[in-house]
Amino acid sequence: MRAAVLHAPGDVRVEEVADPKITAPTDAIIRLSAACVCGSDLWPYCGIDSVDEPVPMGHEYVGVVEEVGSGVETVKPGQFVLGSFVASCGTCEICRSGYPSSCVHRVFMAQVGTQSERALIPHADGTLVPLPGTPDADLIPSLLAASDVLGTGWFGAVAAEAGPGKTVAVVGDGAVGLLAVLAAQQLGAERIIAMSRHEPRQRLAREFGATDIVTTRGDAGAAKIKELTGGLGAHSVVEAVGTQESMEQAIRSTRPGGHVGFVGVNHDVSLSGEELFFSQVHLVGGPAPVRQYLPELIDLIWQRKINPGKVFDLTLPLDEAAAAYRAMDERRAIKALLTV
Amino acid sequence: MRAAVLHAPGDVRVEEVADPKITAPTDAIIRLSAACVCGSDLWPYCGIDSVDEPVPMGHEYVGVVEEVGSGVETVKPGQFVLGSFVASCGTCEICRSGYPSSCVHRVFMAQVGTQSERALIPHADGTLVPLPGTPDADLIPSLLAASDVLGTGWFGAVAAEAGPGKTVAVVGDGAVGLLAVLAAQQLGAERIIAMSRHEPRQRLAREFGATDIVTTRGDAGAAKIKELTGGLGAHSVVEAVGTQESMEQAIRSTRPGGHVGFVGVNHDVSLSGEELFFSQVHLVGGPAPVRQYLPELIDLIWQRKINPGKVFDLTLPLDEAAAAYRAMDERRAIKALLTV
């Protein structure tokens, strides 16, 4: 089959690789309806995460089940399914407590690769959620978004305790940040401040529910959030970047007793214990437990109440994945969909 | 009046100072029933917090109102009262949201000093809670404990979401850590693991409700907690020290999705964003919002359902404050009460 493989920073190639094979009885194989590139794929692409050998790329997926292992009980060939970017057993104590992305048996799909025609899905019963039927073609982008960027933005908003009466600020205007805006709106937030300096992203943020746009960043951005909130800071802040500056911006934009949900994969971030202590903010983040939100998110998409697929502003065939990476890296595209 | 003053690291003197005076209409002056030394008084005493000029010491208090400013409405001379180590207005948005220790008008009582015969209490209406009557003498230590160490341990346990069905681990066996054990027990925790290497403190921890004692610390301590919790870590961890090692021990002892309440005043602590991200723990700490717990804590003490005053294992007259500091610094005493 055809699959995107990263050979070195900046060097993504779509090439022939072996078809996936069932090896564990709990595996399934799906044929993808579409694939896509994630902001987090850019960390190794940019060389910030090291690349020692050719690695398969991609971790988001929606598609049709082609084959299941002998131990798979709830998922059947022919079903349309989607799942999270973390495969999870669904039965361990951590899964049952609502944190499937920290499942004791978890497999990061980034290690498997899904920018390809087919993909192996471990722990199929725990991981995959069957769709209500065959999706209309125009729903595919939104369903694919649910696999990571929508679910991750949703977790960020939930972790930040976005809800009625709350002012929510979102740091980061990538697909995850924009979908955290959508999530905050769905969760009933009163005011949603998107921090963005890019006009097309500002427009999408407004479409997803942002009531205010702040164009400054860092400490100036945090000061602006305080100015907009009577000097106190936002109740809820979603961090969707993962750098030192963005984490500090998020913490400093939050009022005492407020909540920061951080979903940008942290890279070389060091937080001052003293600052955290005196800020008195609640902080939680990590790989989003997307699996637990999927039934709700699929329902919202299926009923066309939300349209998270709008984050895809570039569509290319899988064979042109390299161009998709370049466009995202150069911030010419928010998120690229790859047709397979 | 007589008051303890820190002149330099290791140099606490009890000397004549001016009596406090009402300067703001919202002030009150109380005569202390007893004073005490806190673990956090040791930071400047040890020279870890700098001491540039003689500073009044102490921030815990219970006593009788002697005088109130013209704007004080709910507190009357002659009333027995206690309050938190942070004076708070009680009316700002942050106070009303349950975080009076981050009140926009807050005054840290450590800047005022309460190891003295009398003390000035700012924001008296917001800060002071009248007791149901004149307390029996044997209740004074427990009431004094409520002012900080009990309230702080309580916040640690609440922030860590201690409760029914939960395994709670407590890092630190000072008065705050021991009272976090008591709080976890009152909050209904199923299992409470106290981390302590000191036999008298272990004994008190068991008396307060600890079901297990772990004597190792650092990463070995965290490994032991995992071993005791099926490899997952505790649901709830209270950090009551404030060092790099204790913060990491707390985070590494917590299961994914679990909660860390950190109440040790952090000193030179730097937390890895990557570790926090992948640990997926909830983290919140800071100066405890003790004021909000006082009505409940006073009631428990008044009804003799809890006896937090047991943390005082040394009683000396105020004039011997220097000896009290030495005993705590050398870990010969858990907490010293000063009679005035």
Image (cartoon, coloured by chain):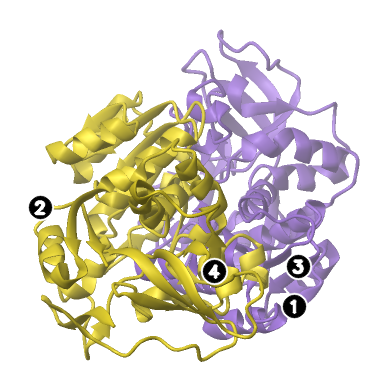
Chain colours: A yellow, B purple
Spatial separation of the CA atoms under disc 3 and disc 2: 54 Å
Q: Is residue A147 visible?
A: yes
Task: Report whether mark 2 lies on the same chain as mark 4.
Answer: yes
Q: Quadrant of the C terminus of chain B?
A: top right
Is there any visible trace of residue A172 in the rendered image?
no
- Residue A72 vertical position relative to residue B258 in the rendered view, above or below: below
Question: Is B182 left, or right, of A246 in this rendering?
Answer: right
Which amino acid type is shown beneath numbered disc 3? Answer: Ile
Q: Are marks 4 and 1 in contact (CB under 8 Å)?
A: no
Name the residue that disc number 3 marks: B192
Closest to the observer, A42 or A138: A138
The type of residue carrying mark 1 is: Ile
Q: Secondary structure at mark 1?
A: strand
Residue behind mark 2: A332
Label 3 to label 4: alpha-carbon separation? 34 Å
The amino acid type of the residue labelled 2 equals Arg
- Protein chain holding label 2: A
Q: CA distance from mark 2 to mark 4?
A: 33 Å
Q: Which mark is residue B123?
A: none
Q: Rounded to the nearest whole Å, what is the CA distance between mark 2 and mark 1?
A: 57 Å
In the rendered image, which quarter contains the N terminus of chain B?
A: top right
Which residue is denoted by mark 1 in the rendering? B213
**In this picture, residue B267 sits left or right of residue A202:** right
Q: Tell me where residue B279 appears, x and y as whole percent.
A: 48, 69
Q: Are marks 3 and 1 in contact (CB under 8 Å)?
A: no
Residue A60: horizontal and vertical position, in percent? 37, 65
What number is the disc on residue A127? 4
